[in-house]
Amino acid sequence: MTGTLTAADVRPVAGQGIAAGAEGFAQIVEAMRNGAAYANVHTAQITSGEIRGAIGKPHDHGNGQD
């Protein structure tokens, strides 16, 4: 899957604290930069999420490379 996420694509999700539109887009970018974003891609075959994982900067593993 490829594509470009724009402010027009951002819709609020109950309980996630992300606004719609440009405000939500800025919140998502900030979450990615802070290492606090997570993606879960749902498909018709695996509705609970087929692909999932953290988005953003690497987590601190204590190796001095973060």
Image: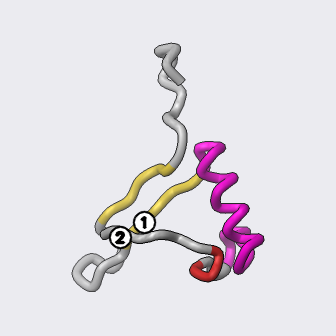
Q: What type is the residue that disc 1 sits on?
A: Asn
Classed neighbour count for the residue bearing mark 1: other residues with Cα under 10 Å, few (<14), some (14–19), many (≥20): few
Q: How many marks?
A: 2
Q: Is residue 27 left or right of residue 52?
A: right
Residue 13 seen from this side = no
Residue found at the very far left of the displayed protein: 45
Secondary structure type for disc 2 = loop
Q: Which mark is residue 62?
A: none
Q: Quadrant of the N terminus?
A: bottom left
Residue 42 seen from this side = yes
Residue drawn at 70 percent across, 79 percent down: 21
Secondary structure type for disc 1 = strand
Instruction: Give the residues drawn in magenta, as a range.
Output: 14-36
Q: Quadrant of the C terminus?
A: top right
Residue drawn at 47 percent across, 50 percent down: 54
8 and 59: which is toward the camera:
8
Residue drawn at 46 percent across, 61 percent down: 39
16 and 65: which is toward the camera:
65
Q: How is the image coloured?
A: secondary structure
Residue at mark 1 to residue at mark 2: CA–CA distance: 6 Å
Residue under label 2: 49
Residue drawn at 72 percent across, 62 percent down: 26
Residue found at the very far bottom of the displayed protein: 44
Q: Residue 29: x and y, percent? A: 64, 56
Q: Residue 2: x and y, percent? A: 35, 68
- On the image, which quarter does residue 7 sit in? bottom right
Q: Earlier in the sequence, mark 1 or mark 2?
A: 1
Q: What type is the residue that disc 2 sits on?
A: Gly
Q: Residue 56: x and y, percent? A: 53, 46
The reply to whether callout 1 and callout 2 are in contact (CB within 8 Å) is yes
Residue under label 1: 40
Q: Residue 59: x and y, percent? A: 51, 33
